[in-house]
Amino acid sequence: NFKKKFLAVVNQDGNALQYASEEFKCDEDIVLAAVKTNDSALQHASQELKIDITILSTAVKQNLLAIKFIPKNLRQKLL
């Protein structure tokens, strides 16, 4: 199905998330895979997933500079 294909794409290039449908930007599996390969993919995630601690911690583990995409009130939980 298309989700599996797009998951394979973001596993190669997380920034592909910027071209995803809103449905995929809200999909935890897809967003998590995207931030694992490119922390800046976080900026393209849905608002709901931009505050998901699992997604955020994955992005920060990938690159500490991802902290700039994280709301200030959540940063202390991750550091």
Image (cartoon, grey):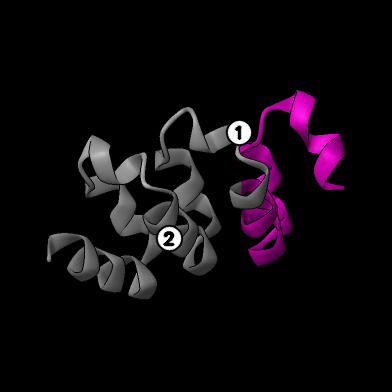
The amino acid marked with disc number 2 is: Ala
Q: At 62% from the left edge and 55% from the top edge, which residue is drawn? A: 59
| Residue 66 is one of the magenta-drawn residues | yes
Magenta region, residue range:
56-79
Marking on residue 51: 1
Q: In this view, does 51 lie above or below 61?
A: above
Q: At 70% from the left edge and 44% from the top edge, which residue is drawn? A: 67
Q: Position of residue 49 (x, y in %)?
A: 50, 38
Name of the residue lying farthest toward the front? 1
Callout count: 2
Q: Is the magenta stretch mostly helix, strand or loop?
A: helix
Assess disc 2: are there few (<14), some (14-19) or many (≥20) residues with their C-alpha within 10 Å of its C-alpha. Answer: many
The amino acid marked with disc number 1 is: Ile
Marking on residue 38: none
Marking on residue 34: 2
Residue at disc 1, secondary structure: helix
Q: Where is residue 58 in the image (x, y as percent from the top left)?
A: 64, 59
Name the foreground residue: 43 vs 8: 8
Q: Where is residue 46 in the image (x, y as percent from the top left)?
A: 41, 33
